[in-house]
Image (tube, helix red, strand yellow):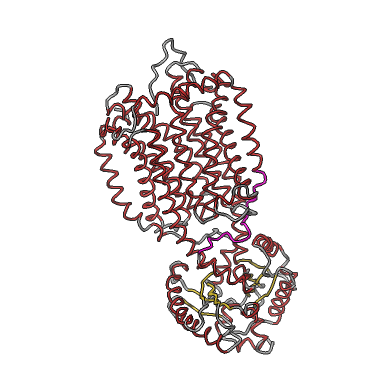
Amino acid sequence: MDVARAVVRKRAWVFGAWLSAGAALLPAARHADTALDVSARILGSQSAEVERALDERFASPFAHSALLVLSGLPSPEVPAGRDALREVTSALAIPGVTRTYSYLDRRDPYFLGSGGSGTFVVVGLDPAGGRVDSLMPRLRAATEARATRLRATFPGAALRWTGEAAINFDLWRTSTDAVHASERRTLPITVLLLLAAFGAVGAALIPVVAGVLSVALTLGAVALISGVWPLSILIENVVSMLGLALGIDYTLLTVSRFREGLAAGAGAEEAAAIAARHAGGTVALSGAAVAIGFLALLLVPLNELRSAGVGGLLVVSTSVLLAATLVPGLLATFGARIDAGRLWRRPRSAPASDRWRRWAGRIVAHPWLVLALALPPVLLLAAQAYRLNPRIPRGDWLPPHMESARAVEDLRAMGRSGMVQSLRVILELPEDTSALSRDGWEATRRYAEALARDPRVAEVRSLRDLVEEQGGDLAAVSLLPAVAKRTFLSEEGHAALLEVIPREKADPGELVRFARELRRSDAAGLAGLPGCRLEVGGLPGFNADYEDAVAARLREVVGLVVAGTFVALLFGFRSVLVPLKAMALNLLAVAAAFGAVVLVFQDGHGVRLLGLSGPVDGVFPIVPVLVFCTVFGLSMDYEVFLVARVAEARRLGMDESDALAEGLARTGGVITSAAMVMIAVFASFTLGEFVLVKMLGFALAAAVLLDATIIRMAIGPAILRLAGRWNWWPGRVAEPSPQPPQRGGAI
């Protein structure tokens, strides 16, 4: 008994196994979002080392912090403003807050907004073994209660949180809401598309159920895994997009093959076994190609991309298993009832098959003409990809309704938004030199003054600034409170922290370059002390590490994806030319998708339709590598669907022309229906508020649209026609049969 037949005959055991998996995973799926990590981390990076040093070597109360922005209140220069600020800071004496630092602690003019328009408080946070962002609900509850009281006296008073912890928390909450909203938008459209494809309610609902199950089961597995391996919130978007797309895509192919079997006169079990055998093999090969792309993401030392890789591997595996095991069992059980709720008579499918057969006839007759018409516009679009700018966009790309984004606007109105972009520079002195020795003290002073002279710097904060308020002598360090020394001086005394606040007009890209310049600079020469070195952290340092982590592994990722996919297709089709053609067309699809991203997001053509006010000057560094790995795998779906059917027709004895016509007739409707579902799923994510997710959704939708129409339905078949028998070299194909196989209907 072959595997396909065993799956169908032993379907009660298959149902039991899936019920057990559902009982274990579905309850966990409901809480998956709360188990995910919202902060990005670059393993082994310099910015991560700075954060670790501040937490461990300095034991700084501000190693983790947030900013509380006060607006609509009197300036703290006047008694009423100081009283209000004191009332606010007293409300922050709650568990999880290590320390506050404000105008009350030091009358630094930087705490005063331009024109006395507001102030802010630096709030140190202690996650106590958990996530820093998990403290935000408690902090906001405390300040909202105090803001309500203050508004009785000052009606315009507002207390808003921002900084890394607050932004991460808001992104997590907004991301979760966006995923659920996208799913609600997608499912009704998907049902309508499948109804149009199958013409029957029963056949349309099975792929939808498979897609929903794929997402839910994968999220349950993600929730369990995140208990031992922290995973990024990005995985939720990846699983939701791909789970619906692939779960429906693969099941649609299986249902289509089952209905073909029924139409040819096979019984329910036999038709289900045929579907499991042929569609199951195609789905497994396609899934392997998609999985290779996500496997490559594990090479990048960035938790977001590694989480996307884990999510992609899980959701692809789940979708393949559902389509190859559960769905055939359900089809065998339902039998002809799969067409329950039929909207029109069955013969409607034949004209669609005939249209694809006629289209194949034109390709067979005029392959060079097809290439001449179809290839240039795609190449022209792909040529725009060279202008892709993989950098963090400048400007306001955070969802505007988020409290943390509004707080950044408040800081900008004060002329103090540089606080969010501050660099944390740790100056490491030689082992035999203490920061509180005369040599160490002077070295720190000289380096701080060198930083302050840079036109991009507004202010440099260090232990020396606090000492100058006590008279400026080194001996005055002993008069400082312990918290001040812990903030700026490591416990062993060989490292000093300098907080570098950039000028207001410095954009994120400029500050990333500044962080790289500092890392390359001669610290010993600027400090005037041999053996000095430095480490640069803060948000600009993190952004520099982020871009470098992706760029450093890009070639390895591309190489693994291309080589792995080639090997998978080589074994799947026993052919050299088919994998080479697939690689070329996949690269074309990826480049064309990047070209579309450049035209829309960077050049601004139609960008307002996606909810943006204008073009952006960069594409997030994570987007190109994630789109490449995803699109390369997804593009393989339609290649495998089509070529597998052409190869099957050749094995049945058809010649190359008839086999191509048969393959297009059988799969053209499946591919276009599956593509429409995928496009609907991906496009729904462009309607959310995240610019990064908009870019992902748009790039994937554009790639599938181009791939499933011009590339796989015109360029690919024309190349197959021109290659002829060489398509299958070095494998053998059957000789043409004098009696071509009987042609049946397809969706």
Which residue is located at x 55 percent, y 19 percent?
A: 364
Residue 648 vertical position relative to residue 559 in the rendered view, above or below: above
Q: Is residue 713 magenta?
A: no
Count up the numbered dots: 0
Q: Where's residue 455, x and y in %?
A: 74, 69
Which residue is located at x 57 percent, y 83 percent?
A: 74
Q: Residue furthest top?
A: 738
* Quarter of the view holding residue 114: bottom right
Residue 434 visible within the image: no
Q: Where's residue 85, x and y in %?
A: 53, 83
Quick check: 391 left or right of 288? right
Q: Is residue 390 magenta?
A: yes
Q: Where's residue 433, x and y in %?
A: 67, 77
Which residue is located at x 57 percent, y 77 percent?
A: 120
Which residue is more in the foreground, 575 or 85? Answer: 85
Which residue is located at x 66 percent, y 63 percent?
A: 507
What type of secondary structure mainly makes up the magenta span? Answer: loop
Residue 415 vertical position relative to residue 30 in the rendered view, above or below: below
Which residue is more in the foreground, 386 or 299? Answer: 386
Q: Which portion, as a residue range, is magenta?
A: 385-401
Residue 527 vertical position relative to residue 612 in the rendered view, above or below: below
Residue 257 visible within the image: yes
Which residue is more in the foreground, 532 or 588? Answer: 588
Q: Where's residue 101, x and y in %?
A: 56, 80
* Quarter of the view holding residue 525: bottom right
Q: Quadrant of the N terminus?
A: top left
* Quarter of the view holding residue 521: bottom right
Q: Quadrant of the C terminus?
A: top left
Q: Residue furthest left?
A: 12
Residue 702 vertical position relative to residue 529 in the rendered view, above or below: above
